[in-house]
Each structure stands twice: as C-alpha cells, then as structure tokens.
Amino acid sequence: MQVGGATVSVGAGTAILTLPDVPSIVTLRQFAVPNIFIRDFKASKDFEDEVGLNINASIAVPTSANQAFSLDGFWANIDGDSSFTCSPTAVQACNIWPIFDSSPTAVEIRGLGNGVTSNVEREVDQWGVSLESQWTMNPGVMGVTRAPHRRYFAVGADIRGIDQDLDILMTSSGAGITGVATYSEDLDTRYYGAYAAWGGDYSPLLLKGLWSRWGLQSSFRFQGGIYNSQTDYDGNLVDNIAAGAGATSALSLSNDEISFIGGLKLETRKRIGRRATLSLKSEYEYYSYVPKMIYNQVDQTGAFGLLGPGGQVGTFIRDDSAFSARTSLRLTIKLGPSEIMEPSK
C-alpha cells in the first residue's frame, strides 16, 4: 500500500535453495583386517528438489525527486525428509561413528539380517534484512516524445542468515542389537556485508507489442556484494543401541570466510485498477560460500579396529556454494486521497 510518500509492500510465494548434500555418520565396511571402507551414505541429498515458503516485505520512503531510502527483508523456510538403510553381509559391518575421533567408541552392527535404518529431517531457514539508498538516474525527463526507461543505482548494508537444523533417528535391527541412536545438528551461518545494485524498467524485446497491449510493466535489478560469513556448528550424538553402546559425543566448531552474494531480480506488474497493481517477482541469487559438513569415520580406541582406506579422520566444516530462488505474488494498493490514484486508461 502507498500512504503519503511511503510505499509498504508484502509478498508471499515459493523458495528453493541448492544446499550441499549432508553425508551420514553411518558407513559400511569390511570388519576383517584391513577393515576396508566399502561405502558411505547421504543423510540428505537433492535438497534443491524441495520447495518451501517465502515471505518478503519492504518500506520505501522518497527523500527527494531522485532519491529514496528503503528497508527490505525476507524469510524463507524449506524442509525435507529422507531415509536410508545400511544392511551388512556376513563379512561386513555397519558403523555409527562418533563425531570426533578421540575416546568415544564406534557402534558396530554386523551379521546377515542385521542393519541400521536412518530417518532424517532437515529444516532450513533463510532470511535477510537490508537498509538501502537508491538514486534515480533519469528523473523527470521532459520535452521528449517517448521518455527513456527508468534507471537507478543503489547501495546498501545487508545481513543474511542460513540456519540449518538436522535430526537423524537411527534404529538398529537384529538379535541382541535393538535400540536407537540419535544425532542432532545446528549449522548456522551469518553474512554481514554491503552491496551495490543497478536496475530499472525494460520491455521484452520480442514481446514489446504484447506487453504494451496487455498493460504490463517489467523491471530488472542486478545486485552484488561482499560479506563476512560466520558459521557455527553444534552436533550431538546419543547412542542407545545395546551392541557397542558408548558412541555418545558432542562437538562445536566455527568457521569464518569472505564471500560474495550476487543475483538478479525480475518483476512484472499489471495495473488492475486506479489504486491497485498486481505483480509477480522472482529473485535468483548465488552464494559463493555455504558450509558443508564432513564427519569423522575413525574409531581411535581401536575397539573395532581403525578404519582402512577411504575413511575420514575428524569432523570439519568445508566450503561449498549455493543458489537460491524465490518467487512471490504481490498486490499493491494505494490508500489515501484521489491525487495518488493512477489515471484512467
């Protein structure tokens, strides 16, 4: 809505985020010497196939004919469930590894008919808040038959967040090894930085006549910024499986990186009355850094022997990249005196 000189917009729609796959703390190996690593599993994969909800809002206040300030924010929530089963043979074992490779003992499940089934829940909150100053580069063009498309330049301060919650319930099966183990993880990343943007109105080259006939208006915005990215990890494994119990462990890690976030916003608007406009907005962004967890796959006590070739020693935060896409439908209504209403066509 538009009240006086200020415009308040609120939108809701869909969101996707292409986060890295999450490996599992469960592996399959040969339990006889040399304890050869056979395979690991993905606790969460293909997260980009999950579609979530996004809500966004902005308040824009003009300060002069060619300058305005705005406060913008968004929040998106995406979650996904998955499961997998590790089934050993007569000479293989499923291991649930402690998340750090010191004193805790791995849980080993071996023998035909035994195994461990993992049910995974992954929930991600992505959000951002920015304060921006924007300058119109060709305000009030007069004395021309057709005014050029509006163009603007903007700079802003920005804070972003990607907060990931992971919960895994591992259930064992077979004689003498009934029970469950649980693993929970909080992996939160904050992005603090500044950005610059350039945008304006445009008409699709091949659909210009159709756009004009339908009364559509489109705009674009390119944006890029440098951010200080701070990641905090907290993981906790609780073992209640009878055979080999003792893998309970907890670990906290942190990581700082300099990263880039850039993207493109596209919006198409349709006036549906003298006071109302309906718009479809899509935002596409690239994150040069998102955290990717690598989990320990070694039992340092030697209770089941050290893992052979292919195992990971220790738990670490690694680097990866991500893409996000958010699409929303917004209705803008001008409230106030008749002077702010659009002219009749």
Image (cartoon, rainbow, N blue to C red):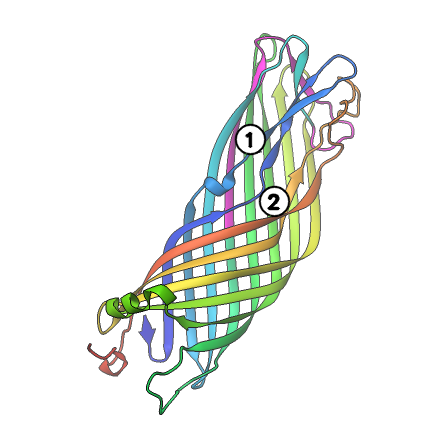
Circle on res. 17 = none
- Residue 63, x across and y down, in percent: 45, 83
Q: Which residue is mark 2?
A: 187
Based on the picture, tell me whether residue 318 belongs to the magenta stretch.
Answer: no
Q: Quadrant of residue 156?
A: bottom right
Residue pictured at 69% horizontal, 19% vertical: 29
Depicted 179 relative to depicted 112: above or below: below
Depth order, front residue of 253/153: 153
Single out the residue that lies furthest toward the front: 206
Q: Secondary structure beneath disc 2?
A: strand
Asked if residue 332 shows in the view, the reply is no
Of residues 94 and 197, the one drawn nearer to the viewer in this rendering: 197
Q: Which residues are magenta?
A: 98-125
Q: Amino acid at mark 1?
A: Ile
Residue 168 circle label: 1
- Residue at the image point whose x is 22% and y is 74% from the top: 274
